[in-house]
Image (cartoon, grey):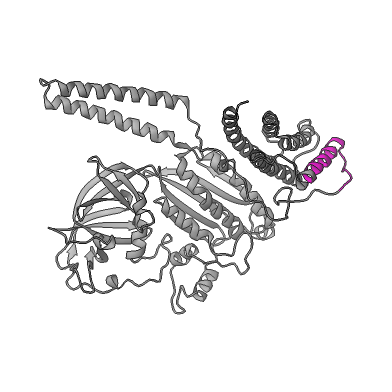
């Protein structure tokens, strides 16, 4: 086998291994809940058998050895000898982790069994003898953690085969066929336009009609390409069953994960960005929300807690909810902790929305002791930051004794943005359309004069409430003075609102998001770039960051984190405010 052939086969091997082990993990957790689940045990055996054979092709003897020992355990189960109970599930899941680790080490050139692997194989042999004889086998009991630690005793980092292989995506052949058809039609349409342009007898209206038809085909082609990036969320959500299982076991609790709307399709890049936020929320649901079995029984609940992850489409966005049926947020404890941290004054009585939103604050935690699962005050802050980086938002709602629900709202794709184009100092900038509430003309007397304390900022009255306004050229550090009548773009995100004063409005436009040029990387307020139809490069503004730094919160809501900030240019009343109408 040539090196080129081996590399190509390795990529395929890693891709299939990741998918098959994830499938096996899901079936093992199903078997723990229902040992008689039809087809689950056969699927687990099929995955192990296939992986052992594929590993043998590459000469990965360590993977093959563990796979063989695992097959020996599964064989009597398939023959009806014994059932998959909680202890056996722990052993099988530990073996699965061992396979993942050995595959990673084999690909990296370390194809050998360590001492922990030898002990795991010996434990599997004992379990095999027990199942075949129907009586407990002599020998040491199986350790609870079969492969979670490395040779030096330190916790082993979780392995994903995506760390070793190129990013791949499986696409239905029907989609590719349609893509090829439309691409061909685009080529034909382009040729027709060229012919019409070369014929002086053809009228302008005929050429314009041909161009419109070509644009229609181009938009269809773009939509098809975007659809190639979308995948059902179910495969990505299935492995959180393991997260729930392991977290509950570590805390002495019982919990199950339920999925709803898992057939909804989402951009692959959005799914990848959701991995860490979802892990934080699900662990928090088990750790803070789900009560111990005895407490749940005393409250008249099922001793097994339920965590539901549901996905659905709404108003052109994807909504993902993580809900638990636990005790709900302890608002009294949250208030006590917030006062201790100086986030809420002793005399203040914050609303329910304010209290709930405090869970998103950096460093905030109600846990007294730091553990491997909680207490460091970084989880939910990471969730909010990551979701806002996706141009999304997160809300929390909770009922005492009934549970807590976190609601994430995100765009369908990160590759395309529906933008609103504005002009400042002769340059075009793009605001995400979902953040634009309305546009209004700058009222006279707003107080946006340059120099002095105001320096391009002021406050307007917008239908009865104060709206802080600031020139976008001031935020971006652009020089010069505006010419003519300016406009205000009212932007809103995550409970904050701000009027961005711009020189001119250029309307809506859908654009392809490009990486930020190196010159602008790291600059605050810049989220990306786009190439306009004129060939001009426009920067996409990060509205979330702009509003975070230059606005004050609206009325408290469950999605609005409490900020104790002072913005002098917004706190002072305007000199001559005027009522602004849309």
Q: Is residue 554 visible?
A: no
- How far from the left and from the top, in percent, is residue 541? 32, 53
Q: Is residue 391 above or below residue 194?
A: below
* Viewport quadrant of the C terminus: bottom left
Instruction: Give the image quarter of residue 104.
Output: top right
Measuring 28% from the left and 48% from the top, which residue is drawn there?
Answer: 538
Nearer-the-camera pick, 437 or 216: 216
Nearer-the-camera pick, 151 or 507: 151
Magenta stretch: give its range. Answer: 119-139
Instruction: Give the image quarter of residue 372.
Output: bottom right
Residue found at the very far front of the displayed protein: 2
Nearer-the-camera pick, 106 or 561: 106
- Left or right position of 386 against 214: right
- Left or right position of 63 against 204: right
Measuring 31% from the left and 42% from the top, which residue is drawn there?
Answer: 511
Q: Is residue 232 visible?
A: yes
Measuring 11% from the left and 24% from the top, which residue is drawn there?
Answer: 203
Residue found at the very far bottom of the displayed protein: 347
* Viewport quadrant of the N terminus: top right
Q: Is-magenta flag for residue 481?
A: no
Predominant secondary structure in magenta?
helix
């Amino acid at each position: 086998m040539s090196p080129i052939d081996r590399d190509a086969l390795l990529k395929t091997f890693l891709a299939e291994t990741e998918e098959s082990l994830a499938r096996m993990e899901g079936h093992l957790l199903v078997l723990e809940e229902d040992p008689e689940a039809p087809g689950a045990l056969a699927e687990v055996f099929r995955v192990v058998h296939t992986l052992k054979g594929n590993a043998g092709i590459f000469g990965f003897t360590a993977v093959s050895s563990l796979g063989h020992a695992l097959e020996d355990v599964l064989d009597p189960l398939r023959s009806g000898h014994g059932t998959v109970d909680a202890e056996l599930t722990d052993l099988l899941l530990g073996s699965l982790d061992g396979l993942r680790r050995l595959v990673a080490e084999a690909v990296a050139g370390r194809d050998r069994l360590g001492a922990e692997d030898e002990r795991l194989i010996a434990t599997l042999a004992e379990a095999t003898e027990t199942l075949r004889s129907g009586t407990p086998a002599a020998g040491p009991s199986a350790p609870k953690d079969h492969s979670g630690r490395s040779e030096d005793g330190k916790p082993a980092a979780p392995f994903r085969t995506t760390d070793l292989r190129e990013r791949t995506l499986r696409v239905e052949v029907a989609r590719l066929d349609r893509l090829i058809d439309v691409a061909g039609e685009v080529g034909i349409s382009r040729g027709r336009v060229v012919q019409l342009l070369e014929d002086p007898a053809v009228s302008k209206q005929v050429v314009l009609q041909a161009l419109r038809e070509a644009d229609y085909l181009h938009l269809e082609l773009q939509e098809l390409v975007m659809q190639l990036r979308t995948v059902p969320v179910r495969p990505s959500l299935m492995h959180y069953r393991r997260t729930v299982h392991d977290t509950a076991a570590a805390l002495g609790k019982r919990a199950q994960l339920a999925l709803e709307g898992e057939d909804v399709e989402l951009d692959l890049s959005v799914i990848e960005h959701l991995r860490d936020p979802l892990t934080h929320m699900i662990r928090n649901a088990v750790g803070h929300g789900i009560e111990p079995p005895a407490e749940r029984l005393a409250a008249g609940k099922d001793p097994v807690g339920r965590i539901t992850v549901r996905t659905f489409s709404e108003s052109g966005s994807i909504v993902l909810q993580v809900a638990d049926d636990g005790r709900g947020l302890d608002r009294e404890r949250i208030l006590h902790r917030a006062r201790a941290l100086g986030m809420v004054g002793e005399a203040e009585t914050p609303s329910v929305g304010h209290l709930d939103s405090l869970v998103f604050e950096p460093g905030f935690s109600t846990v007294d002791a730091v553990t491997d699962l909680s207490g460091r005050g970084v989880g939910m802050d990471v969730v909010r930051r990551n979701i806002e980086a996706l141009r999304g938002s997160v809300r929390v709602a909770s009922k005492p004794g009934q549970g807590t629900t976190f609601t994430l709202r995100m765009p369908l794709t990160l590759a395309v943005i529906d933008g609103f184009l504005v002009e400042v100092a002769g340059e075009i900038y793009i605001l995400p359309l979902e953040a634009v509430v309305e546009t209004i003309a700058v009222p006279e007397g707003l107080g946006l004069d340059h120099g002095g304390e105001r320096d391009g900022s002021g406050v307007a009255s917008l239908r009865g409430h104060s709206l802080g306004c600031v020139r976008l050229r001031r935020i971006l550090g652009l020089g010069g003075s505006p010419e003519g009548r300016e406009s205000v773009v009212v932007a809103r995100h995550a409970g904050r609102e701000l009027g961005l004063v711009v020189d001119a409005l250029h309307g809506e436009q859908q654009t392809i998001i490009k990486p930020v040029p190196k010159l602008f990387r790291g600059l605050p307020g810049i989220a990306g770039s786009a190439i306009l139809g004129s060939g001009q490069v426009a920067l996409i503004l990060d509205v979330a960051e702009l509003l975070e730094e230059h606005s004050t919160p609206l009325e408290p809501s469950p999605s609005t984190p409490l900020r104790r900030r002072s913005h002098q240019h917004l706190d002072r009343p305007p000199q001559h405010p005027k009522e602004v109408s849309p």
